[in-house]
Amino acid sequence: MKKAPFIVCLLYLTAATLVADAQKATAPAWAQETPEHQTERMAWWRHDRFGMFIHWGLYAVPARHEWVQNHEQLSTEVYRDRYFERFDPDLYDPKEWAAQAKAAGMKYVVLTTRHHEGFSLWDTKYSDYKATNTPADRDLLKPFVEAFRAEGLKVGFYFSMIDWHHPDFTIDRVHPLRNNKEARAANARRNMDNFRQFLKNQLTELLTEYGKIDQLFFDFSYPGEDGKGHEDWDSEGLLELARRLQPGIIINDRLDLNDKPWGWDYVTPEQFMPSAWPERDGVRVPWETCQTFSGSWGYHRDEHTWKSNNQLIAMLIEVVSKGGNLLLNVGPTARGNFDERAKERLAAIGKWMKYNNRSIYGCTAAPPAFEQPDNCLLTYNPETKRLYVHLLQWPFKTLYLPNYKGKVAYAQFLHDGSEVQYTSRTAAPAGGHTTVTAGENDLIVELPVIKPDVEIPVIELILK
């Protein structure tokens, strides 16, 4: 055995141990965790890669964006009088929601238990602004959790720290009444200590009354002038509470504790695609991008910038090709159903996932040794040692795999398991103007002229 690789490995392990020890030393006792334990805790999430986000609340009634109260600068009284008594989801069937999520290939779900408007979907003891006091007249969360668990999906809760309804939540720069001088003056009578306790009380209900909760999506901090950050929420207190009540839970990065390695499990780029696997301090970190079908999270009747089926499938592939997860959002209507545009797209994703999910589940970014071919995205399963080539644009007859020579044992289409032939040539014979040529170490994949009836075809490479 050569000494140099051994020494490099030893130095790497020593450095990793020192970093872990340094983090452990600065973390409070309740937040101390070994890297191995965190990896084990997040294993299912890293494997599953694809989840459903659901934004549902009173804002489904006006149906013009989940921030309608903010955008139109409506007071709590006006907003409540207009929409609270009209929230009557008579078509709500969480079993149908869960079946659609499962059929689309999603493995987990995150539901807005309460959004910034402050309206709670469950029968909370700490507010009368809840589903049980509307015409819905029932806890909407319990049947939801039961339905998704019955389909084998992991369950996550979204929990807003913002609350435009609570009387002790101070007016700030993102509050609907930010431009109301009288409301601003009333801040002196608002007690954020009361509000912080309210947050803890509601979070305790969510994490003790609905069984095992797998993921917690806090939303969101906006520190700085006229904003709110970790001190306003008592973020450390919220995080400690969540870890104590649900030790295995996975928690996002929106508590304004980004400078603390123990303050989050994964990062959350929203409504954009990172150019590369996100890093913190030069180290790749777990990440999940949350995306919408259109430009709104809540049901928006007249919003028409809906992504195509091809865009959505390509988005899922690209996220996994960069080592991440996709949380794709549905905004149910005020009557409690998914609208037809959402259903059609979920069905299209499900059709593709039925035959190609092997290139998503358990996969991550390809090793550096495998260069990305033109108009393609790569994913890789480190357990099966299989590489997946997603053909975003169907080429004419030939796909070139640069420097893949000697690395591939077999190739097949993933959707039907049919063999895909390939070869390599270093040069064309003299005068051979129809002979396909490529680099000496390239593979030349022979494809049919007509694209298979698959939205984005995938070639599975079994590596040597």
Image: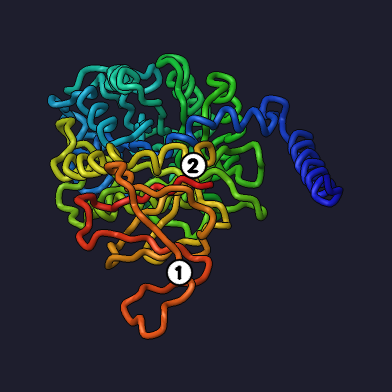
Instruction: Identify whether 277 is placed above or below 112.
Output: below
Q: Specify the quadrant that holds the N terminus.
A: top right
Tag 1 residue: 425
**132 lies left or right of 53:** left
Instruction: Identify whether 53 is placed above or below 307.
Output: above
Spatial CA span between label 1 and label 2? 28 Å
Residue, x 18% and y 39% (percent of image)? 343
| Label located before the other in sequence (1 or 2) | 2
Residue, x 78% and y 41% (percent of image)? 13
**Label 2 CA crowd tier, 10 Å (few <14, some 14–19, many 20+):** many
Tag 2 residue: 381
Q: Position of residue 392 (x, y in %)?
A: 32, 59
Q: Secondary structure at mark 2?
A: strand
**Label 1 CA crowd tier, 10 Å (few <14, some 14–19, many 20+):** some
Q: Nearer the viewer, residue 143 or 168?
A: 143
Residue, x 16% and y 45% (percent of image)? 341
**37 lies left or right of 159:** right
Q: Position of residue 409 (x, y in %)?
A: 48, 48
Q: Secondary structure at mark 1?
A: loop
Mark 1 touching mark 2, by CB under 8 A?
Answer: no
Disc 1 residue type? Arg
Residue, x 31% and y 23% (percent of image)? 148
**431 lies left or right of 265:** left
Q: Is residue 169 visible?
A: no
Q: Position of residue 248 (x, y in %)?
A: 55, 23
